[in-house]
Image (cartoon, grey):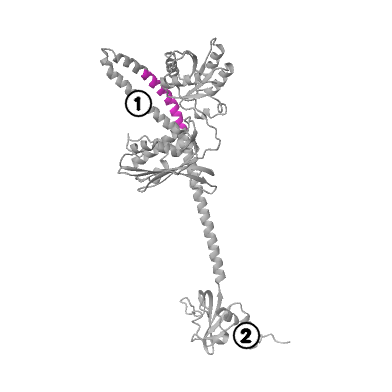
Amino acid sequence: MREVGAIQLTERARADLLDAAPDAILVVDNKGLLVLVNAQAERLFGYRREQLIGTPVEPLVSLADPRFHPYSTRFQQPGRRRDGTEFPASISVSTMVCDGGLLTSATIRDVTERIEAEAELLREKTVAERVRLEAEDSRGRLEAQLHQSQRMESLGQLAGGVAHDFNNLLAVILNYAAFVAEELTSAAATPTGMRWAEPLKDVEQIQLAAERASLLTHQLLAFARREVVQPRELNLNGAIIAMEQILRRTLGEQIELVINLPDSLPMIMADSGQIEQVILNLAINARDAMVSGGTLTIDTSVRAITENDNSLAGAPPGPYVCFRVRDTGVGMSAEVRDRAFEPFFTTKPRGEGSGLGLATVYGIVSQSGGYSRIYTDEGVGTSITILLPVARQGAAQDEPDGPVDLLKPLLGTETILVVDDEEALREVTRRILTRNGYTVLTASSGAQAIEIAKSHDGPIDIVLTDVIMPTMQGPTVANEVRHLRPDIRVLFMSGHAHPVLEAESVRGTDFQLVEKPFDQAMLLENVRRVLDRHE
């Protein structure tokens, strides 16, 4: 039996095995000269074998790496080809002792593709991480905006409720003060009337304070988006130009006003009085931020919001008129900016600001279907951008009935049914109407009003009803009474009517509204407008 032993390889077989290796192999003697190379080494470095044997290994790779181990090690460093180009090389080195001395064997692999693949994977991970972070940031912004919107909505509901109750009180205060002022004016005109001059001034101060309070409630309702407005097609450029002189007087000589308006601008649907209030409030806010003077810039433009446009998050795609007010004032911190639209929030000293200026702007813009955003930083000024939707072509417009002829007496002889759950307001309304010739029937609830409409023998020309009442609200009362008396006219009165008047039961009707707190002239004017209107 033949003894099994080591396989005897010929020199040719050894050379073939060496050339079949997938990696370049370099064998170096103790002087650093190449004594053996394989075919892959020729291909990798670009030299023929006979050009390499006996030459230093250093031009190709450096085997004197500081991590070099006397027996075996692996490291990575650049390799250099014959044409001078370099490539990343993974090198595995081992040493052996032979009869002729110490030999070093280096196995070399070009790892360019691996490194590029790793780099591409890293780039993909980086992009994915950036997308993830951007998504988280966007989600965080949306959550913050949602929280802000919910907080503003809650504050708006509170403000609207307060304004409703307060307007009832103010209507009573204003009108009873007017009654007293009339009596005192008459008494002061008599020969011995000097004693009534001072009380008359006192009453006038009461009236001024009540009127200021009324302005505050209107600002609250505008913020709360619960003020009844009459939107019309409006040219924003025209509104700004019409207010230019008022703005210059308001800003003073220390502040330069720069107005940049395009030649043409699409129409918007908005209440002109509210837009004037927005312009004035923003100008006043900017003026107060520029104590030492500066520049206030107002400009308008057309802007198309696309699906991917997040510059004013929440604004749906479509055409908008962009209204921007910029100042060079003190700016705001991030904390102040985030609360700037809140009602009653102010950085001004006590007694110098109501905190309703920007809150009113926010409410008006929102009620007009628009969007607003503050761009600011401390020391660099503030820019407030507002987007208002472009009016649809052929948008319906409520034509005004035209002004009442003020030379025509506001007296009347018609019969009016007054419906209000507030006794004091019901009584002051009755008194205003009766002292001007009207016959007045009063009801403290919707049910009582319907009963009077059924049982009253004579005519009832108009029902004057509060909008917000318990159990049965004004629109329901009006519809029920009109069912009983089809020819009766309707006039609403309210200081907080918007949500109810937007209801389906009212939308599209011809019902009119007098806003609380009203004075005698306002009430009589609206009553006559409704009574004298041609059906």
Q: Which residue range is magenta in the image? A: 157-178
Measured from the top left, where is residue 157 in percent x and y? 47, 32
Let me know if residue 358 appears in the view. Answer: no
User: Which residue of the protein is positioned furthest toward the right in this rendering?
Assistant: 1
**Residue contact at pointers 1 and 2, CB within 8 angstroms:** no
Secondary structure state at the residue bearing disc 2: helix
Residue at 50 percent of width and 29 percent of height: 498
Instruction: From the image, tell me which residue sits under label 1.
Output: 209
- Give the Cα separation between the discs numbered 1 and 2: 110 Å
Q: Which amino acid type is shown beneath numbered disc 2?
A: Ala
Q: Is residue 22 above or below residue 486?
A: below
**Mark 2 burial class by Cα count in 10 Å: few <14, some 14-19, many 20+:** some
Query: The N terminus is located in which quarter?
Result: bottom right
Q: Which mark is residue 15?
A: 2
Confirm whether the magenta stretch covers residue 42.
Answer: no
Whether residue 357 is situated above or below residue 111 in the rendered picture = above
In front of the other: 181 or 254: 254
Q: In the image, residue 107 lies at what x, y percent?
A: 56, 78
